Image: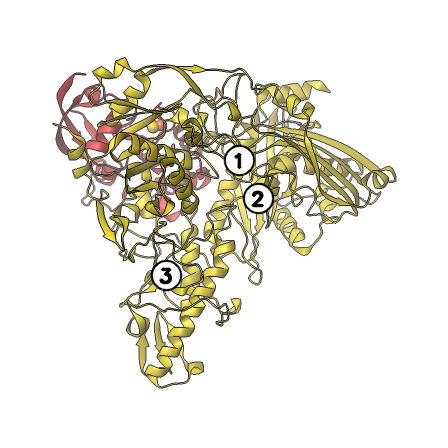
Chain colours: A yellow, B red
Amino acid sequence: MRSPETSSDLLPQAARRDFLRAGGALVVGLSLAACATPEGSGVRSGMRALPLRLREPQSTPPAADRVDSFLVIHEDSTVTLYTGFAELGQGTTTSLLQIAAEELDLGMDQIRAAPLDTHLSPNQGGTYSSASVQRGRPQITAAAAEARRALLALAATRLDADVARLSVARGRVRARKGGRSVSYGELIGGQRFELSITGKAPVKASTEYRLVGQKHKRADLAAKLTGQQVYIQQQRLPGMLHARVIRPRGQAAYGAGARVLRVDDSALASIPGARLLRRNDFLGVVAPLEWDAIRAAQAVIVEWESPPTLPTSAGLHAQMRAATTTDNVVLERGDVRVAADEAAATVVQRGNAPYQAHAPFAPNCALADIQPEGGLVICSSQDVHAARRGIAALVGLPAEKIRVQFGEGAGTYGHSCYDDVAQAAALLSQLAGSPVRVQFMRADEHGWDTYGPPHVGEARLACDANGRLVAYEYHGWQHNWSLVETTSQLAGAAPATEWPPVAVQGVNALVCGGMYSIPSVKLVNHRLPGLQYLRGAWLRSPLDLAFAFVSEQAIDQLAVQLSIDPVEMRRRNVKDERWRGVLDAVAEASQWNAARVPGRLGNERIRRGRGVGLGTHLISHGASVADIEVNLDSGQVRILHLYGALDAGLVVNPLTVEHQIEGQLVQTASRMLLEEVHFDAGRVTSLDWVGYPILRMDACPAVTPVVVQRMNERSTGAGEETMAAAAAAIANAFFDATGRRMEQFPFTPERVLETLKAV
Amino acid sequence: MAQQRFTLIVNGQTHVIDADGQTPLLYILQNDLALRGARFGCGLAQCGSCSVLVDDREVRACITPLAAVAGRAITTLEGVAAWHARRRDLARVPDMHPVQQALLEAEAPQCGYCMNGIVMKSAELLDQNPQPTEEQIRAALAGHLCRCGTYPSILRAVQKAART
Ligand code: FES
Ligand code: FES
């Protein structure tokens, strides 16, 4: 007979709960084998996985200013690196290991990363804005340099030699060639440094680097190709129940949440062990078997209140543009109106952007075991420390009684439903009195996402007769972002509130003209209250695609008016050598030909076009060239080739960053051609891959990633900074092909035909 | 719910399963047999995350009822290298299917979650058509999504696997 117990017993690496009392506080220990890359998983490129050896968990995160919080040196001179960053499938862990191994003079086969866990990992402030390497490199470098200084001091005593004469290779310290040596393990293996990170320990110059800045293969990919990797969706807790949430199919306005009018769970009687659980408007089911939990969620009949208050996806931008807004000037320099009046050429460009979904390939999943005195939650949160606070508030326990462990899922690219499902798991575990695993279904994830927010933009640009920009004015309309997770909101634990108006929600001064030197600039935010709109927050390069879509089309309009080549136009205006560097790099990679005549490629009915764009996210520098094809009869746009150049300062691992650029370009193609969340007045209606199509293999462009390596610059974000540029390049290529400007994306055939017909 | 006894042949091993015959194969593979190749992505036959081979053809385990595949030869990601060796009469089972090896060398996976479907569908393709054109590869994999956008690397890898 099947039972959940036998199911989990069959899992060779199933997590084992192990409660133990430590220092009066309940600490929930979990066999971490399930979170880690398993050993001996066949062929490995680069290195063999080392067995995990983890320190004792503690309920407050280890201090971020202590060496021991980051590094543990074992007796065999291998090292475990603890960081506060999540591996989101982008290979960042490999870069962080390179940084530590470099400073400590270790081989990459001598170092491994500990899993992310509130009870093990220092708090480095969440894994946001593609900034793991940007924020992590200085911290990890400083910790490793401090450790190295201490190790050399110990070695000098042991070897009776001058510190200045010591050299290190693979964790072994030598006084001179062929002389006596001592290993890190012999010096301190298994013991603590008990040192603060002073920031004063000498660090290597970039000219001495042998690992950092070099291509290095990821160690986790063999496991991911062979079924050895244990994704969070595949983790299990002993004795757990399978759970599903019950929500309306598709969210209504953020402020409206979802109100239950009537529930009928009589059908559950025929499903073994199925139970309906409820707190206020939060509903879920549990059952011993997963398929039964899925059936149970469908069998419960719920009548939801459905206030028809949304603007509909078709009416969205008109409502945003007409709404009463709270305005603020982001940046003002000179007088744009006066400068524009005196200019040789002035253009206006408008553009609308839709809601777009994170739509991770696997819907989010979490496991929880909440007991009266404390609990464990395993989830894919980008910030386990913040997730812990939200969960603790929801279940009414002090934060230090909750342990949150990160489990790797599918790539999320921003704030998908990972915290929502973590809260749902915690709440359902508490209500069920049992460990649970909650897997969101496809419609939950697509329908209850915190979407990448929509945008209405207007740019007015002017330049002199030589193509030098003299005035730049940008107005952006966007609504505030949602702060409260759906589970907390429906359970009545927290009312819908908005993010404080942080800069990332508004007009981005870097993407909107920030790459050019322009004497007169005015950037204005028109903020709309968020409660009447869909939930919105970070989606890989949020709003930037929209800003660049508007702004860089305006630049191109000026170039066309003055008959200046678009690359040349940008060369005349870029503000520094780093923007110039990515522009030149992408022009070279794409063999940009300034003499070519627009729209002359392709045939009568299938036109080819080429465009260029600049852009970034919060930092770094991106440039892109797009080659596209537009079918004038069908309105079909095909992207043939995308080139993307990225300057992210010192790129620790150019191989993973090349792959990042590749992914960014493909995702941008998808977002520009296909992706749009649809909703009627009541709810979101695009609830799966048919309603919300993304780019597929058959339509995938060729891509050429170019990493502009700057060994002497600080490392900055590399996970999203070519997307805005690529969005702009695609839009400009469309004009090049057709002589028409798109004012809204995605470029669906209907929209394209409309645009081609309008003029 | 009608509990019945089924015989399931997975990667050459026979299992006896007592379950409702309507249960999709995916949940049996992942919960009863603790296999990690086939995995949940959509449950709607739209993404390819749950792909397995049934009698050498790619099938979506998320919508395939257990009763429909009882007694048939099911191959999962865990068994695809051995399946390949059998189909090609190789003397030795390689560590990986050539497509897995090529995807690894191309560093194709990012999160890697979609790679089950990519490997299984590519394995089926190369089994049916050892020298596919680029267009044939693109068409074969058009039903397998990758949210991380690794398609260009996948394409290169499958082309390389076809050459070896
Ligand atoms: S999970 Fe089966 S096709 Fe998506
Ligand atoms: S590698 Fe992440 S979905 Fe394909």
Residue A147 horizontal side relative to residue A635, left or right:
left
Horizontal side of residue A9 vs A562, given as left or right? left
Q: Earlier in the sequence, mark 1 or mark 3?
A: 3
Amino acid type, residue under disc 1 in the picture: Ala
Could you tell which of marks 1 and 2 lies nearer the N-terminus? 1
Res A722 label:
2
Image quadrant where one finds the N terminus of chain A:
top left
User: Is any part of residue A410 visible from this angle?
Assistant: no
Q: Label 1: how many residues lie within 10 Å, few (<14), some (14-19) or many (20+)?
A: many
Residue A432 locus on image (x, y percent): 27, 30
Q: Position of residue A48 (x, y in %)?
A: 30, 56
Residue that appears at 40% across and 32% down: B137
Q: Are marks 3 and 2 on the same chain?
A: yes
- Residue A440, given in percent of the width and then of the height, sits at 36, 29
Secondary structure of residue under mark 2: loop
Question: Which numbered circle lies on residue A108?
Answer: 3
Q: How many marks?
A: 3
The answer to which of B25 and A288 lies nearer the viewer is: A288
Residue position marked by numbered label 1 in the rendering: A537
Q: Earlier in the sequence, mark 3 or mark 2?
A: 3
> What amino acid type should be assigned to the residue bearing mark 2?
Thr
Residue A208 shown left or right of residue A233 in the figure: right
Q: Residue at x 66, y 34 (%)?
A: A732
